[in-house]
Image: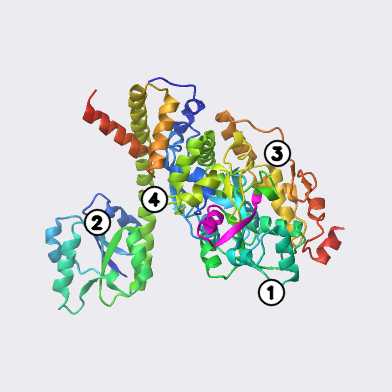
Amino acid sequence: MKQTDNPRDDVLAWVNGSDAPEKHILNLGFMPLTDSASLIVAATQGFSQPYGLTLNLQRQQSWSALRDRLLNGELDAAQGLYGLVYGIQLGLGSAQTPMAVLMGLNQNGQSINLSQPMLETGVDSSQALVERALLGNTKLCLAQTFPTGTHAMWLYYWLAANGIHPLRDVDTRVVPPSLMVEHLRARRIDGFCAGEPWGAHAIEDGMGYTLATSQSVWPNHPEKVLCATQRFVEECPNAARALIMSILDASRFIDESDDNRRSTAQLISGADYVNAPLASLQPRMLGDYVDGRGNEWRDEHRLRFHGDGEVNMPYLSDGLWFMTQFRRWGLLREEPDYLAVAKQVQQLDLYQQAASALGIDLPASPLRSSTLMDGQVWDGSDPAAYARSFDLHAMTDAAVQQAN
Amino acid sequence: MLRILLINDTVKKVGKLKGALLEAGFEVIDESGLTIDLPARVQSAKPDVILIDSDSPGRDVMEQVCLFSRDLPHPIALFTDEQDPAIMRQAIQSGVSAYIIEGVESSRLKAILDVAMARFESDQQLRAELHAREQQLNERKRVEKAKGLLMKMKNCDESEAHTLMRRQAMSRQQKLIQVAEQIIAMHEMLGE
């Protein structure tokens, strides 16, 4: 049989050698979200067998359940929210446990959505929302998916950039992503921030509209990660590296063409995976947005899984950013040792070994520079100052004084 | 001290438990004869607990022993009939079924099951790992074979064939290996 110069063939030697995975079966947790695509594709489309791994997908119903199973060892690795991983690392809301981010899984593709009744009462723009939130008779109730999660941070950032204090001017609730539409229908919430396909699904069901995408808050923002406990990485470094390679291969495959994206959408819409209609899932995966209030566009910063490795590199600056927001919103009462924590969590070495074995470009620096929606530049160079640079925040006075 | 009759009639080698149970301070009678004679042996050995592989064909004989013991002063019961779901779960996980003489507290079984569980957990893990390894290699071979057939049929290169197979699998919500098997089966039916 003809062999192409596939880099995968070069690395087969270690599957049976001393670099062989310590475990050949890995339990992999995921949530029913479009963002899980690379895990589902890797596990079902033969991406892990060449590295000596069988990936058992384990769908979870909530982020808390996923966290608990990761911590008690039922799951070897899982899709994780950046904020959730750092929350555990810092002991916010759960026992403090050393965690590991093995790689980034995707960028972009989350959305802030408001209910149909909001639209019908004239709240059809950011400006109208600001007026309703600040001058209305009742507090709006907005949902996100986890107290320290990315969706909380996108929602808070978006609201604050529009002059709404997320902890004072509105009520926020936590709801698992797949239940958002149900709560919207029952009018228990006025809006939510979550991953797709749940925003598109709300529109498809006539229950709401999309007010903002997460990529409009931060173009190419970090989103889900592949995470594990530090203990897993220490006990099974070869299995961890093999896992990164399997998921990298699958990510590259999804991003290779729109045909591959379409097939991916068909696969993950299945009942065993995301369990959502293809009509809700596919368009936004391709970058085709309809917002439910008459606008349509092809998004320049659509959901992506690989981007020639830019998506997958576990940048220190990505991890640092979530800690700055924890500080900003009072979740962290004291200044953390930002860089030391990020260096411990982000598995730069493992990722670099895996990426170079597959011929994937590595960026020159573990820090990257971005400009967010309010014009603020984040480049990871001075996290403590960045955390204190926002007009709207919830830092406790004592901590701020201490820091000064 | 509890007297345990260990029935050793399957590949699982329940007999390996003997050492561990003896070490834990139990009295163990090893039993590896024909299961058809089980009723008589149970009667002569008078154990407090009988341990048997959950998958043993001898289980049916034990059911018979239980049934006939109903009229004895201390009948034998499948302890999983006891109203302790936690212990029941543990027994299922540990891969042995225990029959106990009525009057023995089921809580005293916990120590026995702990030993059984530790013994079999490592065995099971090892078996599963080996099985996964074999399956991975086999799947790779089958996928390679199907890919080769498809390359000939479609006159395309390897990576194109691989992508075609994956797209087909994904659009039907199947695994790659399923599509590979379909291609091989179709090829066998149509001949060279």
Q: Are marks 3 and 4 on the same chain?
A: no
Tag 2 subunit: B
Q: Is residue A15 magenta?
A: no
The percent coordinates of residue B59 (x first, y second) are: 20, 61
> Upstream in the sequence, badge 3 or badge 1?
1
Q: Are marks 4 and 2 on the same chain?
A: yes
Quadrant where the C terminus of chain A sits is: bottom right
Residues behind callouts 2 and 3 on a single chain: no
Front one among A68 and A272: A272
Which residue is rendered at x = 42% and y = 50% of the image? Answer: A270
The residue segment tinted magenta is A196-214
Disc 2 and disc 3: Cα gap in Å? Answer: 55 Å
Residue at the (39%, 48%) spot, across then down = B125
Q: Nearer the viewer, mark 2 or mark 1?
A: 1
Q: Residue furthest top?
A: A2
Do we see residue A22 in this rendering? no
Residue B158, relative to residue A401: is it above or below? above
Label 1 sits on residue: A138
| In magenta segment, residue A206 | yes
Residues at marks 3 and 1, CA–CA distance in whole angstroms:
45 Å
Element type at mark 3: loop
Query: Label 1 lies in what chain?
Result: A
* Residue hosting label 4: B122
> Which chain does tag 3 point to?
A
* In front of the other: B63 or B167: B167
- The CA distance from mark 1 to mark 4 is 59 Å
Which label lies toward us, 4 or 2? 2
Label placed on residue B55: 2
